[in-house]
Image (tube, rainbow, N blue to C red):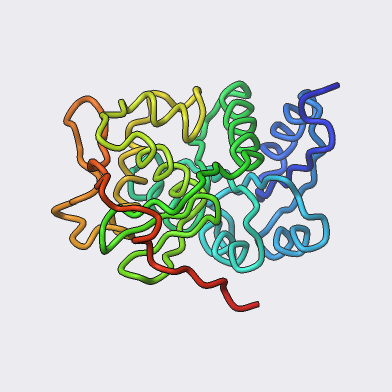
Amino acid sequence: MPEGENKLILVVDDEPRLVRFVQMNLELEGYQVSRASNGMEAIDKIRKEIPDLVILDIMMPEMDGYETLERIRQISSVPVIMLTVKAEEEAKIHGLELGADDYVTKPFSPRELMSRVKAALRRAEMPAPLQKTLTVIDDDLAVDFQRHVVLVRGKRTKLRPTEYRLLYHLVNNAGWVMTHETLLSKVWGYEYRDDTQLLRLYITYLRQKIEPDPSHPKYIFNERGVGYRFADLNEEQTEQDAPAISDPPV
């Protein structure tokens, strides 16, 4: 069975030649492909076709890829890979902050694109990691991995799926240094093991959400040139010490 069978990928770009190039390579891998030439058409197709992944160009007329991504995130959590000719870090950061899952800089090889597509689809299919009890870090932070709940100073804090996976691996190896390569492989996939910039960005995002003072972290520590370490957990705290978590309103 082809790897991409039953997977629908929406390609959004106003350059017909690039769309045909991407479509041909996706179909060679067995994926079904839908096409859109602008942001509004893409949003309409996401509603109607419910694709498994979106490949979205940034540089489009009228509604660019950033605005399109913002609107997509209002209606869907579908994985999105951004295509850009901009190699600057700011462009990548902006796309990730808006909710992109990955980015590919033009020009790119079919092999690179297929690798990113397969990795994004694998991440989307990962079951949520489970843990039997609520993990209480301290009075300010608690995580229930079974219920996908993060409490910061007693309030639920929403994490992106990638941020959640990153926190999961850090907490479950608390007190131990996790190398850049290990974290990248576990959270994003083996193909990303050298992308330390991507890891650094998400460590920053995670610190901004859980640290009382992100500039002076008390949970996630940088081991320069090696990786990151989560603070040692207080073994004296037990499940009985955990703050109660009420179900969210329906």
In the image, is 237 to the left or to the right of 23? left
Quadrant of the drawing holding the C terminus: bottom right
The residue closer to the viewer here, 50 or 174, is 174
Q: Position of residue 242 (x, y in %)?
A: 37, 61
Position in image of residue 202 (x %, y %): 36, 46
Q: In x, y percent, where is residue 69? A: 57, 59
Q: Residue at x 39, y 71 (%)?
A: 155
Q: Image check: 140 left or right of 163?
A: left
Image vertical order of residue 110 relative to residue 59, above or below:
above
Along the viewing direction, whichever of 98 and 203 lies nearer the viewer: 203
Furthest residue in direction left, as rendered = 216
Relative side of 33 to 87, left or right: right
Residue 16 % position (x, y) = 72, 43
Residue depicted at x 41% and y 46%: 92
- Residue visible at 61% across and 48% down? 79
Q: Quadrant of the N terminus?
A: top right
Between 10 and 136, the residue placed more toward the observer is 136
Instruction: Look at the picture and state if 141 lies above or below 13.
Output: below
